[in-house]
Amino acid sequence: MPASRQKPNMRLLVVSDAALAGADQLPHSVRALIDAAGELYVVTPSLPGRASWIADDVDDPRQVAEERLVAVLRNMRSIGARVSGRTGDDTALTAVGDAVSEFQPDHILLALRSHEHANWQEKGLIEEISDRFSLPLTTYAIDPRGHGSS
C-alpha cells in the first residue's frame, strides 16, 4: 500500500452504550473517524438500572452488554475495521477509565442512547469524560430502533 494510503496509528476507543441496527446506520462523520483509525477497541459498559446497581443485581445488564459487544464488533468488522473489545464495568465512567488506562487511546468515540432513553449513568457522562481524560471526544446518539445521529 502506498504511504499516502496507509492508515495513521490513531487509537480509537469506542464506548458503546447502545448498538446500531447495522453499520449502514453510522453517521457519516463517525464512519470517517472509524475509517481513519489504525486501531479500534470497543468497551460496552453493563449499565444496570439504579435499583439493580444498588442491589448488586447486575447479571442481566452484563448479559445485555455482552450481546451489545457482539453486535458492535460485528458492525465494525462488516465495514472492514480491525477491532477488538470487551464488556466493561457496571459504572459507565469506571468502564471508560479502565479502557483508557488499558488501551491508551488518542480519541474517544461515545455511542449513547438517545437522550429520552438514556440510563441514569449516562446523564452528564459526556462532560465527565471530557473533563477527566482530556482526549478528543466524538459523540453520537442511537435511538431504540438502532438508528444513529450525530
Image (cartoon, helix red, strand yellow):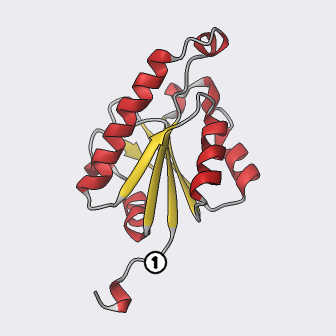
Question: Residue 32 versus residue 72: which sits nearer the camera?
Answer: 72
Instruction: Check the image and report above or below for 26 versus 90.
Output: below
Q: Quadrant of the N terminus?
A: bottom left
Going by the image, does 10 lie left or right of 76?
right
The residue where tag 1 is placed is 8
**Res. 27 visible in picture:** no
Taking the view exactly as shown, the residue that stands out farthest to the right is 131
Q: In the image, residue 56 lies at what x, y percent?
A: 61, 13
Question: Residue 146 versus residue 87: which sits nearer the camera?
Answer: 87
Kind of residue at badge 1: Pro
Residue at image location 48% in from the left, 16% down from the top: 59
**Res. 47 visible in picture:** yes
Residue at image location 44% in from the left, 30% down from the top: 65
Q: In the image, residue 76 lies at what x, y percent?
A: 32, 53
**Number of dots carrying numbers:** 1
Going by the image, does 22 lie left or right of 4?
left
Q: In the image, residue 86 lies at what x, y percent?
A: 46, 41
Going by the image, does 13 lie left or right of 82?
right
Local secondary structure at mark 1: loop
Question: Residue 89 versus residue 48: which sits nearer the camera?
Answer: 89
Taking the view exactly as shown, the residue that stands out farthest to the front is 102
Q: On the image, which quarter does residue 96 sit in?
A: top right
Question: Which class describes the residues within 10 Å of circle 1: few (<14), some (14-19), or many (20+)?
Answer: few
Instruction: Check the image and report above or below for 149 versus 108.
Output: above
Residue at image location 75% in from the left, 50% down from the top: 132
Q: On the image, which quarter does residue 135 sit in?
A: bottom right
Residue at image location 54% in from the left, 36% down from the top: 88
Question: Residue 77 versus residue 120: which sits nearer the camera?
Answer: 77
